[in-house]
Image (tube, coloured by chain):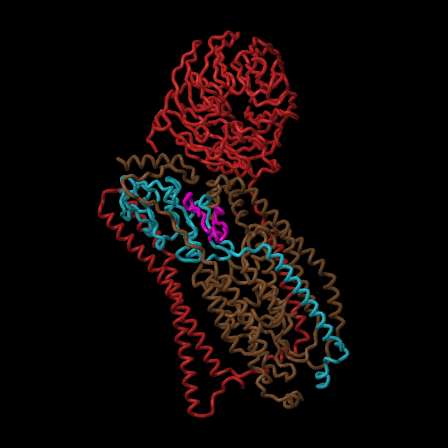
Amino acid sequence: MADAHQHAPESPASGGAGPSRRDFLRQSLRGAAFLALGGAAGFLASRTARAGNIWQIDPYLCVQCGKCATHCVLNPSAVKCVHAYEMCGYCELCTAFFEPDPNGLNTGAENQLCPTGAIVRTFVEDPYFEYRITEDLCIGCAKCVKGCTAFGNGSMHLQVRHDRCLNCNECSIAVACPAGAFKRVPANRPYLMKGKRSEP
Amino acid sequence: MMRPVPPSDPQALRRHQARYLLASRSALVAGVFTLLVAALLALNFAQRQSTDPLEHPELAALKVRLAAEPRSSALKTQIRQLDQELRAEYFRYQSRAHAGAWLLLGGAVVFLVSIFGMTTLHPSAPQPLRGLERDARQWSEPRRARWAVGLLGAAVIGGLALIAVLVSAPALPDSSDAAAGAVAASGQASPEAPIDETAIARNWPRFRGPDGSGRAADGGIPATWDVSSGENVLWKSPIPLPGVGSPIVWENLVVVTGAEKDQRAVYGLDAATGKLLWTGRGERIAESPAEAPEVMEDTGFAAPTPATDGQRVYAIFANGDLIAFTLKGQRVWARALGMPANGYGHAASLLVWKDLLLVPWDQSENGRLFALDAATGKTVWEEPREVHCSWTTPVVAKLAGGDALITAAAPKVIAYGLPKGEETWSVEGLEGELGSSPVWDGQHVFAVGTDSNLLAIEPGAHGSARVAWKTDKDLPDITSPLSDGERLWLLTTQGRVTCLAAKDGTEFYGQELDASFFASPTLVGERVLLISASGKAFWLASGAEYRLLGTAEFGEKVHASPALAGGRLFVRGERHLFCIAPRGGPKP
Amino acid sequence: MRRTRGLLLLAALAAACTGAFGEERFPPPEFTATQYALPAPTRPEARDGMRAGVDVAVLFGALCLSAWLVLRKRSRRGVYALMVFSIAYFGFYREGCVCPIGGIQNVSQAAWAADFVLPLSALAFFFLPLVFTLIFGRVYCASVCPHGALQDAVVLKPVQVPAWLDHALGLLAYLYLGLAVLWAVTGAAYVICEYDPFVPLFRMTGSVNMLTLGAVFLLAGAFVGRPYCRYLCPYGAILRLLSPLSRWKVSIYPDRCIDCRLCDTSCPYGAIRPTTPVGPAPPRAPDRRRLAITMVLLPLIVALCALLGSGLSGPLARMHPAVQRAEAVARGAESVADLTKDDADRLLAFRQNAATAAALPEEARDVMERFHRTAPWFGAWVGLVIAVKLIALTLRRRRDEYLADRGACVACARCFDYCPGEKGLLDPEIAARARRP
């Protein structure tokens, strides 16, 4: 019994050449696998770039659905409102800042559209006011963007802020975006901002 | 064995036990702590789920109340306080969640390290007999595994088959369905609604107006304006892509086209404000010619004027691409007619008769006249055209025998019966490459053969026609004639305007204007509007004597003929679309 | 006064607005009274840049170290230390991204679509562990992969999963791999990343569902060793195929094996294969017959499944955002009232973007066409995986010692610590005597 066990490798059943035949098979398969991997890597190397692609919102496709605030893996979202000042009308009645039909044109909470008070309104000269986004407070809910786009010049728009974005391989906002506004853009041109001056 | 075994030395043993105790205690504490933090985090989250501080109903309710009593300062104070509290609560939630995550991580790490310490200090005894039974079973193991794999495989395949059978493939919208659906859902008239003749009459649905004759009601259009001060300029909107096609108007929508070598677009603007409502892209059409056509600089890539029937807008470009959009800019259908064989570039405009879209296609070879189903773009009929290349847009004349499409190209004027498209009559006598479109004033068809004659044709009752009179003096080569039934105006490119009697061709006057013209003359009530290539508008009285009523400037080149509807004059300049009308509402 | 005028204007614009993007309704002002300088929005740079190169270098170093620790040093302690490093660096510091598991999708999409940009680092991350596996076995899984290391670290009281169940569940990883590749090449979704249970834990933020899933996997991992690696990980599925070909392998002192089974009890992953029992083996004839039958059935199963796959192209295409949008439009054309919130948003977006809307049906049809072409291959893959597994299970091999299965072993080095031969506790003679009954 024990002998049978001990000498099993040499038993006629498995054949004396068994292990070496197997080793040969393994070696050739390994060689083939190496060749295949090398070929695949070489083929794919022609499609590589040093910098990869990162996510960005096309502001002209964005419909301000509000999902950027809720679907980002980060909380608060890496999507923030960005202001293209050159397009801004500096309106006294800013439809991005004020609720529809505001009680008064002042910064009282009852008049403000932004849920976190992230827009700072400052007087420039009569009759113009500047609107500036406090990015740390902005949650990317797009309420102001909606107001600005529907009734104003559309100078406020959403952008993925890359100092915050983790650049997930699969952006969970992009999955949820109803407009297909999320695009992969080259990492060296990471923004799709509105306004000419925003172009690098 | 090779792991630390409790030492035999009593002091060391005590130390060992103390260490184990420490490890187990800290494991317990860390475990409880971790669970607690997890529970708190879950609670934090649940609270946030039930009421989002940023969407708090109480705040919304207060704002509604404020709308009812806008002067209540108490309410305002209340809103401001609540708003501040809620925002603070929101950021507290954020920081709680953040801190909680780190605490949870810390707890879990301590727990794991303690457990690791416990197992190291007090390893469980190896159990060499544990797998004995299993080892002995190994001959039967593959059989079980085969069963398991077989069952799982069957379950997977069965599940997939079930999905394939039960879950239907996604129902995708048809291109036209999609557009129609969007229009129908947004409360527009359904595409099958009959075409309203009065609506056509009050709009400007094609080149030179409802009947292509360049006549409009006065509508109180101001005779003077000032583009720089904005006086009587209701709006002025830039048109991104260049084009010399004229604007068309349907109710509150103005449409112009623009194109360059490699891009084509149709723009829908708000007639009241000039706001660009939509841009219809002309790219991505199957079988569209890969290369840009060769055109003259003056003609460009968007010379034809689009047309509309109140349901769709149709546009054709220099490369023969033909596209239909809804009035909201959704593309309905598109087709490529092929590269036109036309040395100057294709320029004949489209027109719609009932549900047929008529496409003049006079080419240097294989010229045709297409009638397409306006809803789908499919060809209903096409007539071969044995004429020279031309740039004229036909008109529909209401003749005794029914509606006829009057076309003009050298050597003849041909009338086609509608809707079938059979040739009813033709009159020879035109020479040259015709750019001047024919007009119909109710009695005569006027067609200009640039190098030969102007023919005044009188259609007869039974599919016949005769030349009433003709002339070869001062013939235009680009602009089309204008007739009010009594008088006929001809305008040459070099700026000579001639007024003739419509019934016999007697000349009333001839006058040189110091300007050159590409835009056709337009009758605005009792006034004749001529717009020069440099953008200067001349207003003439429509009487038999030459009388200049006034001039006005657009400040940029104008090659397109104007459009008039709803008391507004729309003129396409080189870069802008102008709307001339007295100011009504507030200035935006 | 100004306010009421503004409101009037607002109402007028609201009426005129169809939701297209804003044009310049209010001309940007010329500031005359003040020296106002027009601010420009900031453009923080993307985080990437240099770090990708560092990551690849760290990966290479960690792979080398892992191979050395497992095959030369044979040290569980060393492996554990490296595991902790990997969890800290690739896991918590780099937040589980870049990783070769998700890289499968990028690589397959790049192979499919010529215009897809594949970062060099992603390519390196995908291929380096494959090459190392072909040489040293699954040393990547052992201690470099943060997913594997995290699960390895939480193993407390592992139960032995019965071999038949282990075989069956192991198939899921291959099916998942097929599905992920299908959805990646069609550009529909990166499901591996979307449903990765551990990355949200590494990030310490994410949707509650995913965080819960991660916690569940870790809790289950205390009792079932590395559940994700063994039954789901698509990259592990590839490595399981390559590892048996490796030049070097994990060995448990073959020359000194006394059949003590301690290695087997030490392995939480059921990767140790026992010796063939002493005594007469059952006849081979039935196995040969089964082999012949399954070999004949293989093309049939594959063809059938390919057919099934083509039937699945429609349902599978539903994963693609363009198809979802087109479908929402089609549904909206029937009845707007019955739409879900997401579909209503999609329909709204469709109506607001005339330019993209016009192209949408065409785009969706393109996608459907892609699925028509690829879905049969997915079906064939499902059939192939099942049939080949059945064939593999009819092959019989004799073993004379306790061996780590070359595919299933993740080179965690636990068994080294348990083997009496390892620490020289047994000299060959004692071993020989111990073998005697």
* Vertical placement of residue B335 versus A173, above or below: above
* Vertical placement of residue C27 versus C196, above or below: above
Does residue C341 show up?
no
Q: Is residue C374 left or right of residue B76?
A: right
Name the one closer to the observer, A78 or C38: C38
Magenta highlight range = A173-200
Does residue B392 show up?
yes
Q: Is residue B482 left or right of residue B583?
A: right
- Percent across and percent down for residue C286 are 75, 70
In the rendered structure, does residue A82 fall within the stretch colored magenta?
no
- Percent across and percent down for residue B423 are 64, 18
The residue under the point 60% across, 11% down is B465
The residue under the point 70% across, 73% down is A23
Q: How many marks?
A: 0
From the rendered image, report the letter of the chain displayed in cyan: A
- Percent across and percent down for residue B104 are 40, 68
From the rendered image, report the letter of the chain displayed in brown: C
Image quarter of the N terminus of chain A: bottom right
From the rendered image, report the letter of the chain displayed in red: B
- Percent across and percent down for residue B342 are 61, 27
Q: Residue furthest bottom?
A: B9
* Vertical placement of residue C314 versus C216, above or below: above
